[in-house]
Image (spheres, rainbow, N blue to C red):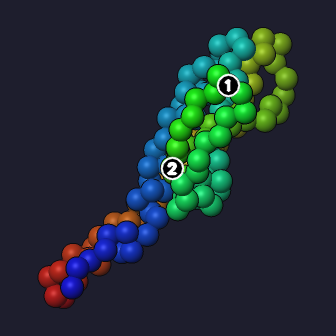
Amino acid sequence: MSISFQNALGNHADALEFRSRRAEVIANNLINSDTPGYKARDIEFAAIYEHASFDVELKGTHKNHLSGFSSGGDTTMLYRNQVQPSIDGNTVDAEVEESAYMRNALEFQASFTILNGRFRGLTSAIRGE
C-alpha cells in the first residue's frame, strides 16, 4: 500500500510556503517604511486557500494584456488599507507591519508544528510502531 503525501500532510506544506512568502512581503514593507510614495502590500491567505485546488484561466480585457494560465496557489498581491495618511504618499505603518509580521510568524510556527507531527506519525507508521 502506498502513502499519499498530499492526503497525509494536507495543506500544511502549502501554508508554510504561503507564510514564507508573506514574511518576505511584510519585511519589504518595513524596509520601505521611509520611501516616499511606497504603497504597503500584503497577501490574502483566505483568497488563496479558497482557490488552492483550482486552476484559473487568465482572461485579458485589453489587447496588450498577457494571456496565460495560473494555478490557484499563486499569491495575489494586494495593497494594504491606509490607516493614517502620510504627506509623502507612503502607506506603511510600522506598528501595523510589525504586528502582521509577528502574527504571520506565529501562524508559520503553528503550521510547522502540525506538519512536524504528521511526519512523526508517518515515520512511526513506516517503522510499524
Circles 1, 2 touching at the beta carbon (< 8 Å): no
**In this image, 24 relative to 35: left or right?**
left
**Quarter of the figure with residue 98:** top right
Residue reaching furthest to the front = 63
SS for dot 2: strand
- Quadrant placement of the C terminus: bottom left
Q: Residue at label 1?
A: 63
Q: Position of residue 69 (x, y in %)?
A: 52, 43
* Residue 97 visible from this viewpoint: no
Looking at the picture, tell me which residue is in the foreground, 36 or 1.
Answer: 1
At label 1, the amino acid type is Lys
Looking at the picture, tell me which residue is in the foreground, 69 or 85.
Answer: 69
Give the residue drawn at x 45%, y 56%: 14
Q: Nearer the viewer, mark 1 or mark 2?
A: 1
Give the residue drawn at x 48%, y 56%: 15
Mark sitting on residue 46: none
Q: Earlier in the sequence, mark 1 or mark 2?
A: 1
Give the residue drawn at x 82%, y 33%: 83
Give the residue drawn at x 62%, y 61%: 50
Q: Residue at label 2?
A: 71
Depicted 88 relative to depicted 119: above or below: above
**In this image, 100 relative to 122: left or right?**
right
Residue reaching furthest to the bottom = 129
SS for dot 1: loop
Depicted 28 relative to depicted 105: above or below: above
Depicted 101 relative to depicted 4: above or below: above
Q: Position of residue 116 (x, y in %)?
A: 34, 66
**Quarter of the figure with residue 2:** bottom left
